[in-house]
Image (tube, coloured by chain):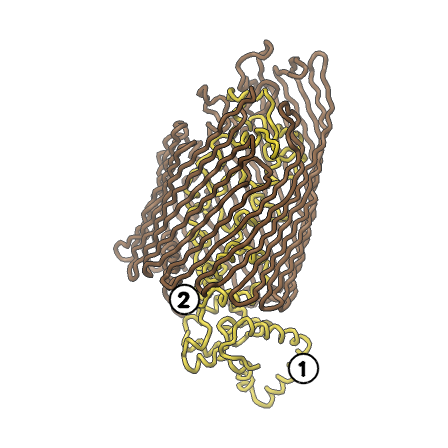
Amino acid sequence: MPVKAHEFPREATAKAAAKDRRLFFFRASRTFFSALALLFFGSAGAQESSVPSGYAGSDMCAVCHEDTAINFRKNAHYVLETNQKLDWSGRSCEGCHGAGSEHAETADKERILVFEGAGRDRINTACLACHNGEETQRGRLSSAHNRNALDCLSCHSVHTAAEAPLLAAKADTLCSSCHISERAAFNRPFRHRLQEGAIACVDCHNPHGGRPPGETRRVSAAEPACLKCHADKRGPFPFEHAPVRLESCSTCHEPHGSANPRMMVRHNVSQLCLECHAGSMSTLGGVPPAFHDLRSARFQNCTICHSKIHGSFISRDLLR
Amino acid sequence: MRRTSISLVLAAACALFGLGTKVRAQEEPIPSAVAEQKLTATVDFGNRWVQDIGGSSDVYRSIVNLGEGPRLFGGEARYRDQGGSYLENLDVSAHAWGGDPYNTARIEGGRSNIYSFRVDYRNVAYFHSLPSFANPLLASGLLLSQRSLDITRRMIDTEVEILPNARLSPFFSFYNGAGFGRGVTTFVSDGNEFPVASHFDDDVSSYRGGVRLRLSKYNFLVEQGRTSFEDQQEIFHDGRIPGNRSTPLFGQTLALDDLSQRYDAESHGIFNRAVLQGHPSPWLTFSGQFLYSQPRVQVRYGHEAKGSLFLLREIAPFTNGMESSLGDAKRPHSSGSWNTEIRPSNRFRIVQSWYTDRFHIAGGSLLNEAFDTVPPATTETSDVNLTLVNYNQHQVDAMYDVTPRVIVRAGHRYVWGDALTRPATLQLAETPRNTGEVRRNVGLAGASVRLPSNLSLNFDFEASPGDDTFFRTGLMEYQRVKVRGRYGIRPSLTITGSFSLLKNENPAPGINFDFESRQTSLGVFWTPTNSRFSVLADYTRATVRSEIPILSLPFFGTELARYRDSGHHGSIFAGIPLVGEARLAVGGSLSINTGSRPTRFYQPEARITAPLARHVSWTAQWRWFGFEEKLFHHENFRSHLFATGLRLQM
């Protein structure tokens, strides 16, 4: 199938995919004709015909781009070369860069798709031609990164990746190069142990698109990412503390880091509780009875009695 | 050019954080001989000494918790054998083994077309003991924490996919997370609280399996999983303790002699998930997910307390009280989302996203109590509870490429939902609401600019007049602004900056909530070309201002609750070349908070790396941790850490 030198990888891939559908039904006949070709023209002739016209073939690319070709053998994308079913064997470079016979003949960068400065749409379209169906991309359309026009190569480096999966650097380093203030929160005393390597940004956030707030991940049955580690808070509790379920853990906690113990959003427990438990005709939140004499230190520490503050198996008042 | 500067910045960051070999991989082509090597590995090991922990060691453990002794600081191995019979790629990494509180290990590998697998293991120790936290006796000078933890969480997450690039590929996943350890909590008996020992032991396992179907334009995923959960908690005490109350109650001096209390919670539930993704035409892309789960929990609870105790509702003392309870809860949960991107023209995109989350929690308990008062008091109480939640969000964004480098967008988000909860049993003031609503119309606007002069800017704005919110401090009438910028002054020098503002008000009578938070950040990344010198620095100024009237009990008056946090956070790391290939990295971070809880936290450090042989280098590191609390001086600490070790590379 002749392909134009500037044909976009997405279209080329779509055509390849359509061809792939037919492949299954005509595999036997193709094998038969391949055998005939081998018989009459020998193996050299058969190899030449394996690269469609318009394509240069990976071997041709390696003549000039030797280092890239060597590194590519260790690249996850090398599966294009080894997996016959993907139909890019012998021309894996052109799976992303488009058919390159004209480029090979002229060495003209204008005659092949170069991703350096190609623009968000061209880059993303090329990558998503194959990766759009992956589980991680499920929330991509509504993600903040998509809205802010970030392209895949903002984080990924296809040829010279430092980290799996083809990341230009360690994930935390990549995130903090833009999200400086979030990174700074981990310098606070009470924080998740990001700097120590116990946790990574992508453990809680899905950079391709998660759920609000903050593109967070969901684990198991659509539960907040926090519950993956803090399993004792998952419930369901017969007696729930409503904010845990109605809003998020960040109602009471600063997930990145805080100057307050237990990463709370307020410096003492009673203020945090009473900001909601003050009685209002328009919002949820009960009013403590009068025996809670807040002049007494005992009642200034609500969790002394309400020890099961995230939810209780026994007590409606979250006492035990 | 922009990518070049970003690469240099990331390369410098990697170098400073100990990933020097990877940086060289980015900057220089790998010689063929090395590139053909199937196995590459790096191991960092050595010894750490912790010297001179001054101040509170409990707070040191709560915040830093690094110990001394021989350590495997980190290790990585990569195996590549394209065309290998059974295994083509294998990545193994492990960090902080040998007694550190955060051990991680990860194994990932497979053979293309046949299988792929991933194993992620973590062992995290949480220690938390701050005398100032929830301690009613703090004012009297008693510096014993009444709420502390010393627990370990151990997690293993595995996934195996068969035929990973085939049209139809099954996958299986298993996750187990276990938490266990000890702590101190309070046992509350009428009129007094007693700090007692607690024991935690929980275990959650999740099994998932499903298939992925990949077609040329559509992708499907269906999976089913099962989650089981067990939680055993105990609190116990043996021996007489007076508790927090020193004054007699109705003439009786209260004390606890013996306590045994235990939870046994068991939960299990099946969940089902289906995902559809498609790009049927060049102008249309969509994705959707539906998930249903129904976890259920059953609880047994027993309790026996002995001592000189008091039952307020009978106004009678007792020496032995027993409780037993059975509880049950279930939570049917439906969740769905749908996203569509339509591109009517090359320059114009419309993105629609919808999300819904609906569940209810039905639970109840039966509680039996028996006290040896005179006459004996026995009660049987049954209680049921229902929480109903219906939350929805719909958002539409229109994006227009004014030029290939300038994109503007505008949109609308509508959030709506309702909830039903039951309030606590004791409500002596006005009748609280048990139904709530959230309703928010949010206007959205933004722009993204990528100028050829290596300047990129992102601007986001959203605002809502607010109609209803669940809680007093929830988002109501709010404006949120985010601006992010990056300017590559030259390939070796990049400046990044960001500003965010959230202003939220709820002027409803009886609430009058006023909240504002600001964060301003500036980062400088300087990596001169042809030099091994580099500097990474960032500074963030973060402020929070919150004011809301709260109840002043016991007289139901009102007072204004103010919260202030004004933080200066910064870090700087400089890479300095020394003799030969030796390298010095110096820097650290600081966090200075003033406001409602003034704290200072310093973490300076210095590290020397020097090659000893072709595959061996020596590393020495010094770190200092300093923590100061202005209001609680007894929680201050400072410590020196020294570590030295070798890095072996093959």
User: Residue lying furthest bottom in this view?
Assistant: A40
Do circles 1 and 2 both sit on a common chain? Answer: no
Q: Of B221 and B175, which appears nearest the observer?
A: B221
- Picture quadrant where residue B404 is located: bottom left
Mark 1: which secondary structure? helix
1 vs 2, front mark:
1
Q: Residues within 10 Å of mark 1 (few under 14, many from 20)?
A: few
**Residue bearing the label numbered 2:** B34
**Residue bearing the label numbered 1:** A29
Q: Position of residue B3 (x, y in %)?
A: 40, 62
Residue at image x 52%, y 79%? A4
Q: Answer yes or no: do the residues labelled 1 and 2 have beta carbons within 8 Å?
A: no
Residue B382 placement, left or right of B93: right
Q: Amino acid at mark 2?
A: Val
Tell me which chain the residue with mark 1 is part of. Answer: A
Q: Of A273 and A282, which appears nearest the observer?
A: A282
Q: Amino acid at mark 1?
A: Ser
Chain that appears brown: B
User: Residue lying furthest top in this view?
Assistant: B251
Colour seen for chain A: yellow
| Residue B78 visible to the viewer | no
The vertical placement of B72 against B282, above or below, is above
The vertical placement of B531 against B362, above or below, is below
